[in-house]
Amino acid sequence: MMKTKTLSGILFLMLGSTLLANGEPTAADAMFTVNNTWMLVSAFLVFIMHLGFATLESGLTQAKNTVNILFKNVSIIAIGILTYTLCGFNLMYPGDFNGYFGFSGFGISAPAGVAGLIEYANGAYTYFTDFIFQAMFAATAATIVSGAVAERIKLSSFLIFSTIYVAFVYPIVGSWTWGAGWLADKNFHDFAGSTLVHSVGGWAALIGAYTLGPRLGKYGKNGNIKPILGHNMPLAAIGVFLLWFGWYGFNGGSVLSADPGGVSLVFVTTTLAAAAGVIGAMVTSWYISKKPDLSMILNGSLAGLVGITAGADVISPMNSGIVGFIAGIIVVLSVIQLDKLKIDDPVGAISVHLVCGIWGTLAVGIFSSEYNLGIQALGVLAYGIFCLISALAIFQAVKAFMGLRVSEEEEILGLDIGEHDMESYAGFQIFTVE
Amino acid sequence: MMKTKTLSGILFLMLGSTLLANGEPTAADAMFTVNNTWMLVSAFLVFIMHLGFATLESGLTQAKNTVNILFKNVSIIAIGILTYTLCGFNLMYPGDFNGYFGFSGFGISAPAGVAGLIEYANGAYTYFTDFIFQAMFAATAATIVSGAVAERIKLSSFLIFSTIYVAFVYPIVGSWTWGAGWLADKNFHDFAGSTLVHSVGGWAALIGAYTLGPRLGKYGKNGNIKPILGHNMPLAAIGVFLLWFGWYGFNGGSVLSADPGGVSLVFVTTTLAAAAGVIGAMVTSWYISKKPDLSMILNGSLAGLVGITAGADVISPMNSGIVGFIAGIIVVLSVIQLDKLKIDDPVGAISVHLVCGIWGTLAVGIFSSEYNLGIQALGVLAYGIFCLISALAIFQAVKAFMGLRVSEEEEILGLDIGEHDMESYAGFQIFTVE
Amino acid sequence: MMKTKTLSGILFLMLGSTLLANGEPTAADAMFTVNNTWMLVSAFLVFIMHLGFATLESGLTQAKNTVNILFKNVSIIAIGILTYTLCGFNLMYPGDFNGYFGFSGFGISAPAGVAGLIEYANGAYTYFTDFIFQAMFAATAATIVSGAVAERIKLSSFLIFSTIYVAFVYPIVGSWTWGAGWLADKNFHDFAGSTLVHSVGGWAALIGAYTLGPRLGKYGKNGNIKPILGHNMPLAAIGVFLLWFGWYGFNGGSVLSADPGGVSLVFVTTTLAAAAGVIGAMVTSWYISKKPDLSMILNGSLAGLVGITAGADVISPMNSGIVGFIAGIIVVLSVIQLDKLKIDDPVGAISVHLVCGIWGTLAVGIFSSEYNLGIQALGVLAYGIFCLISALAIFQAVKAFMGLRVSEEEEILGLDIGEHDMESYAGFQIFTVE
């Protein structure tokens, strides 16, 4: 008797995906299986990015708001997945539609029988694989917002905003490009989502931070800017490394198969952009502030990653380094500029995701001869207008109905006690940094 | 000359698994290779769950016991792997046996020659892959116990209990189902171990927590329950995300091949159950305690994951959400109920792993027409009786020979200083929360 | 219309790696794809080891130097990747050369066309895959040094040392064995880098720690040794688990294909050595110091992993356990001995990477009949001499030009404030442990 778990017959019967059971596998069966496996690996890599967001955002904010941030991040992944199941997937990929808005029904439903399941995506992966890979992306946009509005937004208001944004806005604009909508027709190129994911989140982050206003005491009179320090730099570093790690699935999986040339090129461009982003941010921030700033190089690597996301498949390795290096410069300048504009973004989310998302989308038009800079700019504009209006409308509605911001007392006390009646570091002596 | 590490000839000669070297590969070779690769990916995913357990348990307990908890968790994975190598694997998969107890000898021994290695598991993976995937599971049961007995058990007593439990009890009861024993014959279905892993650990956790009694001061007179707060919520969140992440290997690898339909279905059911578990626990705890409780939604996601583990291959995506949502409700109610019974489980391990493990096992009988609810209940009962008796006997023997619980002074001082003469956070000002 | 991202045509056109597009795939195509996929999975696993190093090193040192350590670790991965792109890869794999030093030009350049890309590595993976897997290794050697010189080296001096060491020394000595140089000709065997990576880093760590001298107050008069405690044991444990996790790619990818027999054997030997290393260090340290020492078992698992790295492909599972167990003993004795010699290594990097790297390299000659102990010793010696001289020369030059060590005031104050003007744990009450 074989030493192994007894193989579940029902699994094969129910699904009918009996590649192994039906006699000898063919080469096409084997290719299908490796493609599908790579997409599932990519899905779990994108999943762990949510831990990256949670730790990065926690680390760069104050200890008194940590439970709140963790609560938001755990909730968002759950909400994002469930709303994507309910309606998002079918809004984003409606099948034949007018190119602007389509919907193919509630819930997910696998094609019937073996054939449907297997032949679903041109022999690259199953229906379920497609769904789960896309579902892991969905919550990302809302998570980006979370960082920019941290330390002052009401929990319930944030959860309602996120639910609506991730359930409707993200998939509808997504359909314009990845769902074969009007921007796809125009040959707009956004490989893995510099615009579709990062800017979509970034626009809402901008509106959120602007609508809420800055944290108490952040901007003094006379243009004085008071840094509000993050409470846990190892957590922030864990976040950045995990995001970089997960990006191998975010970009690598966006090849939509395990194609050796494609995925390996994407690994190289993604890596070089991230590394060059670190150096770009290091040089810029060291030059400006005369000291090596850890939070800037952390954001520099993310800037490089966001920057290469739109063109990781069509930009050469060397040019990827340039794209990342410039993104690293941009993110530092953007963080400084936003502070001058008194837009208070505790973690730099707007600079990383929105500003570098725009840069990356335009970079496709600059560094790849196949795509047109004007069309890339049109895409940026279209997403910007729709997302700005949507985010503004939702935030204003939420504000009118239930309020957006916690009370001054609660903000000073911290949202952990105020919203959750719970401390993040019970037993530790912690004081408010003044 | 090719730019690459020079390929080690000896590896191929010794193993004889020269799929590539022997001329053209066949489609069956390629399929075998992708199946085997997926199982190894699953193995490293299950491995990282042990970091998830270590950080979750550390985060939810007091700072003064953290070194002790980390020591236990690092030791357990080592002990689990080594005992599984020595005897566990051959107790769990004894080959032809009476269905209740069998043993095929000490140590692991690969079949001789190429053929044995490759044809071992019906062309799905090698002997070594089978072993390592199973070995990663083995330590899990003992780790579950660790959380429930934390902050008061003597280190040496715990290590001895765990060694015996993981070396003998886990593999013997495992053989009943996965080793093709008597419960497999009855068509009892436990896909990836709601019962075989989680409840097996959970029963011992229950006995351990009961035998030890509650932590000092936990239950006051008049039914007063004093919460003893966890010291590091980011650590707890890291733990939960890593466990969810690793579960893609725990459940995904339990398909025992890279079958595209099977693995992708399991990814979807696992994910939906976890997400719905978060929501179930959020709604229930918010309703009961009138505040959004982070530790409850963290346990809610684990509850959903444990709940779907028995049926991730045979429950439809939509029903998986229901199973997870109910698990999220159950875990909150169970945590409250155990406190009423004065069974002190610092991390909620009994509620997550035992109670939701039982729920998940029964859910197979409810949501899958292929399996019988009575048989599922029989399985739950059989595992319960054997594990309760075994755990009780081992704990009592250990108690009689060397004592189970640290002294009152040591418990107040903390086990880090008491057992290890070492602090977890040297330099930080930490006080005992009263 | 298919529900999926619209597949990017340009990716395939540009790369020409149209395995799927060109009609039916062959079995060789499928095998190539799975091999390539496994190598990319290994690459991202090796990547996450850098987070492991960052957290381990942070956790085992003082809170006042944490920003500095994180800054070094983020910088090193970026610098390592970029210098490897610029020159390292072509120094390490120069093609036909004299066996001691060769260089095939600046930058990376994929072979032209489909054929070159695909047939590059004997059908196992693409040029880009080869590069990215190797690039992930490159920064490791420098990171090892980081731990040994922590808490007292000037940031700029460290960055310059690392850049030179990783850009030139690591790839040049690497070419001797993996680049098919003179030691490969002599049948020296170092599977995944006990010597080529770990000892190469370890020798520089030794020279660095020796040149800098011990931290202030570490060694009192009369041979008094004052422990300087690590500030965050959960971080250290996270580091060790992530390193172990990543090692499945470090060793598993060094098979250079997804060969089922080879990779699964390597998983088993790697795991058993790590587990036995924990036990070896536990027994030894418990016997010597009469208490269960967490930092020793953490280092014990790494010792086992470093120990098996040279021979993970040619040592039997049972002997791997022995190699790991002995490594666990060695690391404890080495840590004690280095302290007696007043060589101050804050994290035990020299003991883990250099001493156990040597042990592992020699173990190949002891436990595998295919390799010669004398040749293994010759390799150890050759690497030792070259690395010692190189590291000494670079450290002395850096010292002469810009100084190596921070001022006494800065060391007492902490490098976070001194070098970065930033705290790692803003708001936490932290005092210097005396």
Image: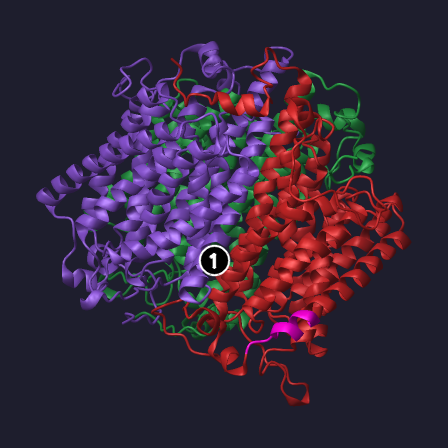
Chain colours: A green, B red, C purple
Can residue B398 be found in the magenta stretch?
yes
Q: Please determine whether, in this image, residue C31 is positioned above or below residue B143.
A: above
Q: Name the side, left or right, on which C302 lies relative to B140.
A: left
At a point 70% along the width and 66% down the height, the residue shown is B394
User: Is A291 or A382 nearer to us in this picture?
Assistant: A291
Q: Quadrant of residue B200?
A: bottom right
Q: Nearer the viewer, residue A116 or B144?
A: B144
Residue in the image at 69% along x and 78% along y: B342
Q: Amino acid at mark 1?
A: Met
List x then y, in percent, for residue C330.
39, 49
**Could you tell me which chain the residue with mark 1 belongs to?**
C
The residue indicated by pointer 1 is: C282
Dominant SS of magenta comes to: helix
Residue C197: percent from left, percent from top: 35, 36
Q: Which residues are magenta?
A: B396-406
Q: Height in image: A397 above or below B123?
A: below
Is residue A273 something one can see in this rendering? no
Location of residue B189 in the rendering, given as x and y in whole percent from the top left corner: 82, 47
Q: Residue at x 20, y 40 (%)?
A: C160
Label 1 packing within 10 angstroms: few (<14), some (14-19), many (20+): many
* Helix, strand or loop at mark 1: helix
**Residue drawn at point x = 32 percent, y = 20 percent:** C181
Residue A109, placed above or below residue B123: below
